[in-house]
Image (spheres, rainbow, N blue to C red):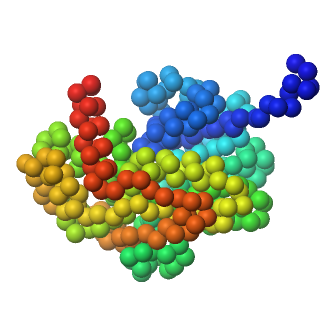
Amino acid sequence: MQWSENVNIKMADTILILGACGQIGTELTQSLREIHGNENVIASDIRYGDDEFVKEGPFEIIDATDREKILEVIQKYNISQVYLMAAMLSATAEKYPQKAWELNMNSLLIILELAREKHIKTVYWPSSIAVFGPSSPKVNTPQDTIMNPKTVYGMSKLAGEHWCNYYHDKYGVDVRSLRYPGIISWKTKPGGGTTDYAVDIYFKAIEEGKYECFLDENTMLPMMYMNDAIKATIKIMEADSKDIQIRTSYNLGAISFTPEEITNEIKKHLPDFEISYKPDFRQDIANSWPQIIDDSKARQDWNWSHDFDLASMTEEMLKNIQSKIISA
Ligand code: AKB
């Protein structure tokens, strides 16, 4: 090939997703493959997930705390972007605090170091509303406020945010992050979170017509439909670096509701649906979190907006779960 032919070739991003078989990782992988092409998005997880998904493009078994293996894969595929989606969520992390800290922190520090050493250009790392604590304002929780998280998961996310900011300020690492609320999806179920009830409730409504909720009826939490979460993630990664003013992590909001409100919405479609409440240890976690997030910085800096409210999300969830069950 002549040099002149070469100059017009724009180098495509080659992407590695760690934790690709998880709730967000699965759908993120699919969306990124649609944008960048299957062969340019390398899915990885500690074990194989769904067979179809694995066959759609390159897949590698990677433990997100294994620096050597990650570097080997980065070099094998000439990776430029890493999405680090592997993490232990709030409820499981309370059962295994040391393990949670090790996984959540070590995996991040490995990726930040690899970026500092210029093996990667851009890093995406998810934070969470769990960075806030009982002394944070509950309504319209600001971007910058008292944090004091009470959970190991929240502590790891808050510490991680500061590591991201440090690597950006000190070494110029291009790392971007969002504080996800509870994410609602039907393709892959979440595991080990406090907001998971808002996914389980839809499945149980269709499969059994009833649900026993582990939070009480008035517990309001910030939530988001998966399509919006994927949209936000891709949008922040595609934004101009100069527009990313916050290098800890952006507050990200969409909707907030209580178990009672989601039940009433489900009942509009399934009038016989029954709910009962049996709060467990996750109630304390939920009580320490915000109810409504102020995400105006994300809306200003890189034009974030959400599409789904409780009614449209409920319609989508019930429709998709029903067809998933029929085609299974
Ligand atoms: C959890 O419940 O732990 C997560 C989160 C809010 O980060 N869904």
Q: Tell me which corner region of the image, top left, top right, bottom left or bottom right, holds residue 291.
A: bottom left
**Rendered residue at 55%/76% (across/down):** 144
Q: In which quadrant is the C terminus drawn?
A: top left
Q: Position of residue 110 (x, y in %)?
A: 66, 50
Q: Position of residue 305 (x, y in %)?
A: 48, 58
Q: Tell me which corner region of the image, top left, top right, bottom left or bottom right, holds residue 289.
A: bottom left
**In this rendering, position of residue 86 left or right of residue 198:** right
**Rendered residue at 73%/47% (across/down):** 121
Residue 216, relative to residue 119: is it above or below? below
**In this rendering, position of residue 214 left or right of residue 251:** left
Q: How many marks?
A: 0
Q: In which quadrant is the N terminus drawn?
A: top right
Regarding residue 327, the answer to whether it shows in the image is: yes
**In this rendering, position of residue 292 left or right of residue 327:** right
Regarding residue 20, the answer to whether it shows in the image is: no
Residue 119, relative to residue 38: is it above or below? below
**Rendered residue at 36%/45% (across/down):** 185
Q: Position of residue 301 (x, y in %)?
A: 61, 64
Q: Nearer the viewer, residue 243 or 118?
A: 243
In the displayed orientation, state which residue is furthest to the left: 272
In the displayed orientation, state which residue is furthest to the right: 3
**In this rendering, position of residue 109 left or right of residue 259:** right
**Rendered residue at 29%/63% (across/down):** 257
Q: Position of residue 116 (x, y in %)?
A: 76, 53
